[in-house]
Image: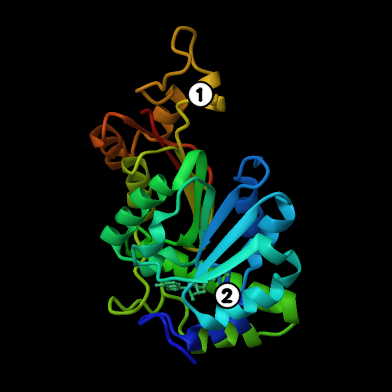
């Protein structure tokens, strides 16, 4: 069997094909969330999936957008064969192709209406992710969206320990719910798949902090950069390529802006947020020190996990 990728192996593919349904927290909800973030598509447009694996997300996209095609890129022959088999009924609407995520040769794609990826971009290091985000921005049509589902690097040891426990718990639950036994969970442990518990800096996994990735998206030119879901060290986040020809979309926050300030972001967080974060001087400092064109707001104080970063350009 051809090993196209030096890091991710066909053996990894087989393990993930066999046990991915246990290993991925809220997998069905993640797929639903990604699909829900893609705006209605005009007929005949293309969605690109980076590292499509066995084609579960591609299948949901093809079903939800019956006039769209999905270009499914992956580096594993095993995964592409599984995706081809699963999606055979969609005919030409699913276009599988080998690629290496780290290479540049496939980045000449233009005018994609959405580019999505699940559980793969963490195989790139920080600078590679930044280059990818800039390239994906170029690959999208105006108004196109980039949605990433991935493992992220928790900010600090305590957060890492919380993520490790939460991932174990999620896999344990899925194992019980899906099969009524702990076989899936036991393999998760044997394989040392929980990178928050068994992190090896020389391993194929190079997750980056979520906050940094949001900033890289904004720096690449994305607007409405946001986090849409997060659990057990896994997050779904992304942004939109600004469409200068379209009317500016009105987000709820902007819509509620003070009279005379509509369409702009307030530089100062609202009073409730200032009170809530009175003790959070580091976060406040980060907000103030961030690029003045980027407004950072913590929008999910109750869960303490969701950030929104908006580039006002
Ligand atoms: C954890 S699996 C995720 C599969 C699928 N996206 C999902 O969420 O079910 C990681 C996928 O990324 C692919 N992959 C990993 N590194 C890659 C690389 N450098 N180039 C291309 N594909 C890669 C693997 O072949 C595999 O299909």
Q: Are marks 2 and 1 in contact (CB under 8 Å)?
A: no
Horizontal arrangement in the rendering, residue 123 relative to residue 95 (left or right) = left
At which x and y percent is residue 262? 48, 14
Q: How busy is the neighbourhood of tag 1: few (under 14 within 10 Å), some, or many (20 plus)?
A: few
**What is the basis of the colouring in this image?**
rainbow
Q: Name the residue located 66 percent from the left edge and 56 percent from the top edge.
A: 61
Q: Which structural element holds mark 1? A: loop
At which x and y percent is residue 33? 62, 51
Between 239 and 228, the one lying in front of the other is 239
Q: Name the residue located 50 percent from the left edge and 89 percent from the top edge.
A: 190
Horizontal arrangement in the rendering, residue 54 relative to residue 233 (left or right) = right
Q: Which quarter of the picture shows residue 93? A: bottom right
Q: Quadrant of the C terminus?
A: top left
**Disc number placed over residue 23 in the picture, else none:** 2
**Disc number placed over residue 248 in the picture, else none:** 1
Q: Is residue 25 visible?
A: no
Q: Nearer the viewer, mark 2 or mark 1?
A: 1
At which x and y percent is residue 49? 54, 60
């Amino acid at each position: 069997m051809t090993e196209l990728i030096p890091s991710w192996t066909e053996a990894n593919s087989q393990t993930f094909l066999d046990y991915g349904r246990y290993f991925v927290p809220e997998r069905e909800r993640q797929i639903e969330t990604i699909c829900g973030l893609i705006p209605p598509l005009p007929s005949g447009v293309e969605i690109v999936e980076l590292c499509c694996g066995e084609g579960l997300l591609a299948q949901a996209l093809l079903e939800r957008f019956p006039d769209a095609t999905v270009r499914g890129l992956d580096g594993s022959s095993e995964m592409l064969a599984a995706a081809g088999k699963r999606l055979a009924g969609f005919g030409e609407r699913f276009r599988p192709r080998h690629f290496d995520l780290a290479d540049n040769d496939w980045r000449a794609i233009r005018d994609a209406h959405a580019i999505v990826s699940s559980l793969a971009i963490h195989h790139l290091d920080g600078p590679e992710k930044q280059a990818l985000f800039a390239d994906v921005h170029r690959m999208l049509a105006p108004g196109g969206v980039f949605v990433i589902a991935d493992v992220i690097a928790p900010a600090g040891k305590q957060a890492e320990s919380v993520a490790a426990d939460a991932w174990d718990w999620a896999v344990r639950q899925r194992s019980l719910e899906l099969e009524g036994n702990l076989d899936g969970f036991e393999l998760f442990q044997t394989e040392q798949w929980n990178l928050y518990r068994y992190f090896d800096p020389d391993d194929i996994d190079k997750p980056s902090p979520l906050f940094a990735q949001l900033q890289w998206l904004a720096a690449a030119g994305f607007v409405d950069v946001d986090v849409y879901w997060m659990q057990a060290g896994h997050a779904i986040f992304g942004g939109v390529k600004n469409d200068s020809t379209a009317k500016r979309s009105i987000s709820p926050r902007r819509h509620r802006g003070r009279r005379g300030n509509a369409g702009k972001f307030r530089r100062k967080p609202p009073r409730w947020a200032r009170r809530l974060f009175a003790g959070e001087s580091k976060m406040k400092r980060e907000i103030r020190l961030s690029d003045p064109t980027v407004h950072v707001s913590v929008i999910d104080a109750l869960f303490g996990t969701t950030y929104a970063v908006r580039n006002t350009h």
